[in-house]
Image (cartoon, grey):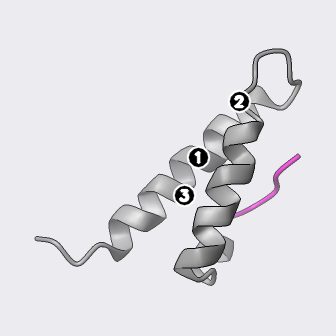
Amino acid sequence: MFKMTKDDLAKKTDAHLAALFQEASKGLVVGKPDLASAQSLLAMIRAEIARRDPRP
C-alpha cells in the first residue's frame, strides 16, 4: 500500500505530510490488509513532523 522512506518524507511539504497522514489513517480501518503498513507509515510521519517542530 504505502512504500515511503524517511528520506521520501523529509522531501515532502507540511501540507503533503498532512495529506499522507490522512490517507494512511484510512488504512487503519479494521479489516484492511495493509494495517501494519499504515501503522508504520503513521509512525514515520509523526517522527518527521516532530523533527520539523521548532519547539525545544
Instruction: Give the distance between the C-alpha atoms of the residues marked 3 and 2, in whole angstroms.
Output: 14 Å
Question: Label 1 sits on what residue type?
Answer: Leu
Q: Is residue 34 magenta?
A: no
Closer to the chain start, of discs 3 and 2, is 2
Question: Label 3 sits on what residue type?
Answer: Ile
Instruction: Give the distance between the C-alpha atoms of the residues marked 2 and 1, in whole angstroms.
Output: 10 Å
Read off the residue under disc 2.
28
Instruction: Give the distance between the C-alpha atoms of the residues marked 3 and 1, in whole angstroms.
Output: 5 Å
Residue found 65% across the figure and 74% down from its top: 16
In the displayed structure, would residue 19 be above or below residue 27? below
In the displayed structure, would residue 54 be above or below residue 28? below
Q: Which image quadrant for residue 35?
A: top right
User: Badge 3: few (under 14), some or many (20 or more) residues near its Cα, within 10 Å?
Assistant: many
Q: Nearer the viewer, mark 3 or mark 2?
A: 2
Q: Which image quadrant for residue 9?
A: bottom right
Read off the residue under disc 1.
42
Whether residue 12 appears in this view of the structure is: yes
Q: Of residues 6 and 30, which is closer to you in this image?
A: 30
Residue range in magenta is 1-6
Residue 37 is situated, as x and y percent measured from the top left of the image, at: 75, 38
Magenta: main secondary structure: loop
Report the side of 56 relative to 4 (left or right).
left
Question: Label 2 sits on what residue type?
Answer: Leu
Read off the residue under disc 3.
45
